[in-house]
Amino acid sequence: MAQHKSAEKRARQTERRTAVNGARIGRIRTFVKKVELAIASGDKAAAQAAFQAAQPELQSGVTKGVLHKNTVSRKLSRLSARIKSISV
């Protein structure tokens, strides 16, 4: 346990940050899941709409430091490829 004032403050800050970052990651996962469900249903238009909504969420994860930019690029690329492979 923290013994110094500064260490106690740092522990409080870490606790808050962890909660905020967890909420951000959960929000991102929800958006990605919506895209995945649309792809699974085979509805290309819905998948594209969900993808358009998910893109800025993933990019904000990079900006906020929750996800690495290459991770987001990889996820977006793979989702995009799966959407393109849906036959109309």
Image (cartoon, rainbow, N blue to C red):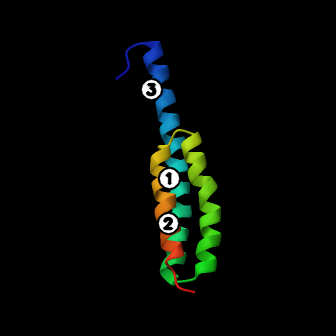
Q: CA distance from mark 2 to mark 1?
A: 10 Å
Residue 79 got which mark? 2
Q: Could you tell whether 4 is left or right of 58 in the image?
A: left
Between 37 and 17, the one nearer to me in the picture: 37
Q: Could you tell whether 53 is left or right of 67 in the image?
A: right
Between 3 and 69, the one nearer to me in the picture: 69
Q: CA distance from mark 3 to mark 1?
A: 32 Å
Can you name the residue that lies furthest to the bottom here? 88
Please tell me which of labels 2 and 1 falls first in the chain: 1
Residue 87 got which mark? none
Q: Are marks 3 and 1 in contact (CB under 8 Å)?
A: no
Residue in the image at 64% along x and 62% along y: 53
Amino acid type, label 3: Ala
Residue 73 got which mark? 1
Residue 22 vertical position relative to residue 76 in the rendered view, above or below: above
Residue 86 vertical position relative to residue 78 in the rendered view, above or below: below
Q: What x and y, as percent, mark residue 82? A: 48, 72
Task: Give the foreground label among 3 and 1.
Answer: 1
* Kind of element beneath mark 3: helix
Residue 11 got which mark? 3
Amino acid type, label 1: Ser
Q: CA distance from mark 2 to mark 3?
A: 37 Å
